[in-house]
C-alpha cells in the first residue's frame, strides 16, 4: 500500500508540474500575442500632428493653396474646388447673420472656404507615419476648430473623417434650411441629430477619439457657451467608425456672400497612447480567449 500510495503521489505531482508548465506556456502565449498587438498598434498608428492658420506657409503670405504643408505630421493639403468655390485666408469673425461674430482665429487668421451655385470646396489632409499613410489608432484623437456662417437652403458645411480611399466613416455638418435646427453626424451612411442648435460664433474645439472595437467619443466646445457637449457611439446604436486615414473639410453650396463662408483652424492629433494603455484595452479580450481554451482543455 505504501509503495502504491507513493506511486500515486508521484504521478499526481508530475501531473501538477505538467499542468503548471501548460499554464505557463499559455500565459507566455498570451503575453506574446499582447506584445505583438501593442507593437502592431504603435507601428501602424498615425503620427502626432498639428497645424494652424497662422503658421508658415500660410502666413505672412496670406495664402491657402493646393500642396501647402504647414505644421508637422499631416500630409500636404489636397484642395479641390470649382468655378464658384475656393479657398482664402481671413478672420472668422466676418461671417454670420450680423458680423462680427465669435471667431476661431490664431493671430487674426483662419482657413476660409466658400462655395455657391452647386459647387463644392474640399480640403483633405492625410494622416501619416514614418513610411507613408497611416490610420487613427485606438486612443488617438483628431481635433479642430470650425466656424460656419449662414448656410443657404440646401447647402452643407462641416468635416468628414475618411478611410484611405476617401470614403466617409464619420461626418459632422449643418444642413442649410433643415427643419430640425441641429448639427448632425453621419456614421457609415446613417444620420443622427446632435440636438445642438445652429451657431455662427464657432466651435473652439471639436475632438473625435477612437476607442476599442471601433467605438468612438466626440466632444464639442462652443464659443461663448460654458461647458462641453459630449457624445459617444453608445448613444447612436453603437455604430462604429473605423479605418480613419484622413480628414476632409468641406463647403457644399453654402453661399457666395462673406457671411456664408466657413472657417477652420487648429488641426491637432495626439500620439498613440503608451503601450501600457493600449494593452489594457486588449488584455480583457485576449485573456478571455485564453481562459476559454483552458476550460475546453479541462
Image (spheres, helix red, strand yellow):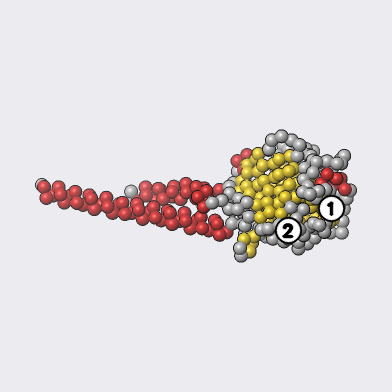
Picture residue at 77% right of the left edge, 42% below the top = 202
Residue 115: mark:
1
Q: Residue at x 82, y 53 (%)?
A: 89
Residue 20 relative to residue 167: left or right: left
Of all residues, the one furthest to the right in this rendering is 257
**Image position, residue 40 (x, y; %):** 53, 58
**Mark 1 nearby-residue class (10 Å; few <14, some 14–19, many ≥20):** many
Name which residue lies at 48% across and 58% down: 36
- Measured as percent of width and height from the top left, residue 167 is found at 69, 56
**Which residue is nearer to you in this view: 92 or 168?**
92
Residue 189 lies, with reference to residue 102, above or below; the image says below
Helix or strand or loop: what does disc 1 sit on? strand
Q: Secondary structure at mark 2?
A: loop
Residues under labels 2 and 1: Cα distance? 24 Å
- x and y, in percent, of residue 142 in the image: 66, 50
Residue underneath mark 2: 70
Q: Indicate which disc residue 158 carries.
A: none
Left or right: where 152 falls relative to 221: right
Of the pair 266 and 146, the residue shown nearer to us? 266
Circle 2 Cα neighbour tier, 10 Å, few/some/many (<14 / 14–19 / ≥20): many
Answer with left or right where residue 159 lies relative to residue 83.
Answer: left
Quarter where residue 234 is shown: top right
- Judging depth in this view, the residue of 167 and 251 nearest the camera is 251
Which numbered disc, 2 or 1, marks the residue closer to the eye? Answer: 2
The reply to whether discs 2 and 1 touch (Cβ–Cβ < 8 Å) is: no
- Residue 51 visible in the shown view: yes
Amino acid at each position: 500500500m505504501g509503495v502504491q500510495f507513493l506511486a500515486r503521489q508521484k504521478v499526481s505531482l508530475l501531473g501538477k508540474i505538467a499542468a503548471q508548465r501548460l499554464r505557463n506556456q499559455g500565459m507566455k502565449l498570451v503575453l506574446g500575442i499582447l506584445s505583438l498587438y501593442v507593437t502592431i498598434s504603435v507601428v501602424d498608428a498615425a503620427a502626432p500632428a498639428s497645424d494652424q492658420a497662422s503658421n508658415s506657409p500660410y502666413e505672412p503670405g496670406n495664402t491657402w493653396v493646393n500642396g501647402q504643408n504647414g505644421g508637422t505630421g499631416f500630409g500636404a493639403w489636397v484642395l479641390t474646388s470649382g468655378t464658384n468655390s475656393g479657398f482664402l485666408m481671413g478672420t472668422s469673425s466676418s461671417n454670420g447673420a450680423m458680423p462680427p461674430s465669435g471667431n476661431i482665429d490664431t493671430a487674426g487668421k483662419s482657413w476660409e472656404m466658400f462655395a455657391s451655385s452647386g459647387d463644392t470646396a474640399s480640403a483633405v489632409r492625410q494622416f501619416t507615419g514614418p513610411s507613408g499613410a497611416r490610420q487613427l489608432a485606438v486612443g488617438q484623437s483628431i481635433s479642430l476648430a470650425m466656424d460656419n456662417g449662414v448656410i443657404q437652403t440646401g447647402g452643407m458645411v462641416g468635416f468628414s473623417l475618411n478611410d484611405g480611399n476617401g470614403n466617409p466613416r464619420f461626418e459632422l455638418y449643418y444642413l442649410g434650411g433643415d427643419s430640425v435646427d441641429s448639427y448632425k453626424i453621419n456614421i457609415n451612411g446613417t444620420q443622427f441629430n446632435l440636438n445642438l442648435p445652429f451657431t455662427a460664433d464657432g466651435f473652439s474645439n471639436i475632438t473625435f477619439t477612437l476607442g476599442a472595437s471601433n467605438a468612438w467619443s466626440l466632444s464639442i466646445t462652443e464659443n461663448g457657451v460654458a461647458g462641453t457637449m459630449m457624445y459617444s457611439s453608445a448613444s447612436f446604436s453603437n455604430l462604429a467608425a473605423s479605418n480613419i486615414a484622413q480628414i476632409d473639410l468641406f463647403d457644399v453650396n453654402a453661399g457666395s456672400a462673406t457671411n456664408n463662408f466657413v472657417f477652420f483652424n487648429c488641426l491637432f492629433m495626439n500620439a498613440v497612447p503608451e503601450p501600457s494603455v493600449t494593452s489594457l484595452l486588449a488584455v480583457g479580450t485576449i485573456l478571455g480567449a485564453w481562459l476559454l481554451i483552458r476550460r475546453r482543455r479541462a
